[in-house]
Amino acid sequence: MRILVVEDERKLARTLKRGLEVEGYAVDVVYDGATADLRLRSMGDDYDLVMLDVMLPGMDGIAVSLSARAAGVTAPILMLTAKTGVDDRVDGLDSGADDYLTKPFSFEELYARIRALLRRPREALPAELRLADLTLDPVSRRVERGGEEIRLTAKEFAILELLMRQPGRVYAKEQIERAAWDWESDAFSNVIEVHVSNLRRKIDGGRTPRLLHTVRGAGYVLKA
């Protein structure tokens, strides 16, 4: 899952990025509304959720949200603001935001809001992803094969979830990088190959049928 954080308070933005990455999300950060607007218009489909501060320099969060929705961006938008008035919340929701969280907030509440928003997929998907005897629960982040729990790292989980959402589709390394790594990461060289190799060992090792396949020169695919 990839999240865009739009927050001009750089200390808070860095804290949000670190906390969300610990939870297993890939996180990009921008610090002003104009940059956020450009990013969402050009690659809005790459994000599973947008955390958007209302009071931004130049173009505020309300304008960014309206612009994003007008451009066809369907990712859930979680507004962050220090404003607590009812009218402020109404303005945020009317601009296309899906939820509204006032500052200061606890990370526990933030994570709960994010989980709730991510349970509302943009396309109709089952709550639990399944292929053969492999299951993945995006909310509890639990993976099982044949009833046996499989422990995955955050990156392994992100890759598996991506592949399980469209079994049979071949994903190039670049597509996996966009989904599971932020722009400042070093997901180049053999980093993705190493994660995929570890993932294959965990979900396929000693089991049949093999599910995770390499398509030479094209990428990776999950299929029975």
Image: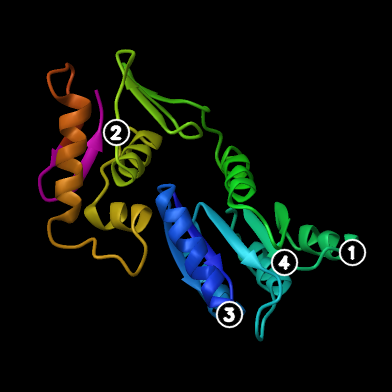
Q: Quadrant of residue 165?
A: top left
- Would residue 65 appear left or right of 191 to someone viewing this image? right
- The amino acid on which the numbered mark 1 sits, given as a three-letter code, is Asp
Circle number at residue 81: 4
Q: Residues within 10 Å of mark 2 (few under 14, many from 20)?
A: some
- Whether 203 is drawn above or below 44: the answer is above
Q: Which residue is mark 1?
A: 87
Mark 2–mark 1 Cα distance, whole angstroms, equals 47 Å
Q: Of label 2 and label 1, which has the lower sequence position?
A: 1
- Whether 62 is drawn above or below 153: the answer is below
- Whether 10 is drawn above or below 40: the answer is below
Say whether marks 4 and 3 touch (CB < 8 Å). no
Q: Quadrant of residue 7?
A: bottom right
Residue 52: x and y in percent read 63, 65
Mark 2–mark 4 Cα distance, whole angstroms, equals 42 Å
Q: Which residue is mark 2?
A: 168
Tell me the mark number nearer the camera, choosing from 4 and 3. Answer: 4
Residue 71: x and y in percent read 61, 66
- The amino acid on which the numbered mark 4 sits, given as a three-letter code, is Thr
Tell me the mark number nearer the camera, choosing from 4 and 1. Answer: 4
- The amino acid on which the numbered mark 2 sits, given as a three-letter code, is Gly
Q: Residues within 10 Å of mark 3 (few under 14, many from 20)?
A: many
Q: Residues within 10 Å of mark 1 (few under 14, many from 20)?
A: few
Q: Of label 4 and label 3, which has the lower sequence position?
A: 3
Give the position of the C terminus as an image quadrant. Answer: top left
Q: Which stretch did the figure color magenta?
A: 214-224
Of residues 218 and 94, the one drawn nearer to the viewer in this rendering: 94
